[in-house]
Amino acid sequence: MLKMILMAGVAAILSLSGAEAQTTPPQAPPPLIVEKKTFEMPSLTTLGGQTIRQVKVGWQSAGALNADRSNAILITHFFSGNSHAFGKYKAEDAAAGYWDAIIGPGKAIDTNKYFVIASDTLVNLNTGIPSVVTTGPASINPDTGKPYGMDFPVVGIGDFVNVQKALGESLGIRKWHAVMGASMGGLQAYDWAARYPEMVDRIIAVIAPAEAPAWLIAWLDVWASPIRLDPKWNGGDYYGKEPPNAGLAEALKIVSLQSNHWEWADKVTGRAFAEGGKDPAAAMGNRFRIETLLASGGAARAKVSDANHFLYLVKANQTYAPGGAQTAEEAAKKIKAKTLLLYSPTDQVFPAAWVKATEAALKANGVSVESAEIAGPNGHLNGVIGLGPHGPRITEFLAR
């Protein structure tokens, strides 16, 4: 700051003396550097009544808790995401967290004002990313000394929330100023508000409704099908062997396509051939660019993901019931938190009509709720990459 003031002063003096002021463009602020930490629980009793021992999840934070610990904001992540919602782990990292545009010093969610925390969920998909810490089927069962595989207990969104609750309480947090998340993260925000209404002052649910309709359940099954059809899945028993990455890659390809939109496809590839001069109409082996783009993306993600974890995440989303409520109408009766809903009108995972139905249910039960559309060509993914323009609204909502 002092350097910038001095430079401004020199420029002004040169201008007044008739000399030509030589100025340099303002430098971008240094990246927010965050540390990945690990939270451990001796055991967790799931909502299904089973016990998981030696539970671990990773987490990161920015900002500082105030004296009465009333400024804490929890960021909950989407299906294929993790705790890296903001900042960088090292200054030289290629990319910052997925919501870095709105979380950090002086940003919409200002870490000079709020203590912002984000954590990995149980059964996190990204077991091959070194910074991700999670407990799930790929973890070692302390009772056998071998990976759980499909012996890992079924877990749900409410179990994710209960681990977050324990993490918050270990830091002395008894009430969240806000819980905010996109997609599966939005489901967690609703669950927090319905399961522990006295612990949440407000929620920001992005691209998410407060229920899992039958259509979603069916689509999630479609996501999972390629894994189950891969012979290398072997009923979930593949640890120490070649993993079912072909099936997992196909599953992730389906997720990527449904999470986007035809506007994106037309803009990015259109009907371009995968290889110049190789018309797909001329030979069965010739392909379109959109096909190879999705295939390569799925294959790359599969290398750092786990197939069983994918299946457990599918089950968690299929069985979603915020606070035990099976419908948005039932959930709305439990929720008291002020609510901001941000949705994409072109969403093909959680259609806008579902979000609007949740909004109507909340209003019918006297909840203070407002909503806004997220623009962009990326369908569901608008809620991950397109929140920048909504920064002022988020800031105002948090300050209210």
Image (cartoon, rainbow, N blue to C red):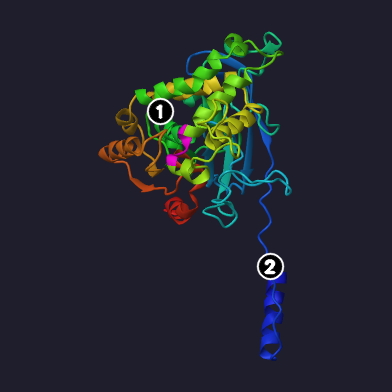
x then y, percent, for residue 136: 61, 20
Which quarter of the rendered picture does the N terminus lie within?
A: bottom right
In the displayed structure, 225 sits above or below 205; it is above
**Residue kind at label 2, given as amino acid type:** Met
Residue 189, given in percent of the width and then of the height, sits at 45, 36
Which residue sits at x=56%, y=51%?
101
Q: Nearer the viewer, residue 282 or 13?
A: 282
Residue behind mark 2 = 1
Magenta highlight on residue 195: no
Which residue is identified by label 1?
A: 322
Name the foreground residue: 181 vs 110. Answer: 181
- Residue 287 placement, left or right of 221: right
Badge 1 crowding class, 10 Å Cα cut-off, few under 14, some 14 to 19, many 20 or more, is many
Q: Quadrant of residue 202?
A: top left
Q: Residues within 10 Å of mark 2 (few under 14, many from 20)?
A: few
Q: How far across and how far down the image is residue 250, in percent?
A: 55, 24
How much space separates mark 2 and mark 1, taking CA atoms?
47 Å
Viewer-proximal residue among 395 and 303: 303
What amino acid is labelled 1 in the image?
Answer: Pro
- Report if residue 384 is visible in the image: yes
Q: Is residue 311 left or right of residue 335?
A: right
Which numbered disc flags the more N-terminal residue, 2 or 1?
2
Magenta residue check for 261: yes
Secondary structure mostly seen in magenta is: helix
Q: Residue at x 69, y 41 (%)?
A: 35
The span picked out in magenta is 258-262
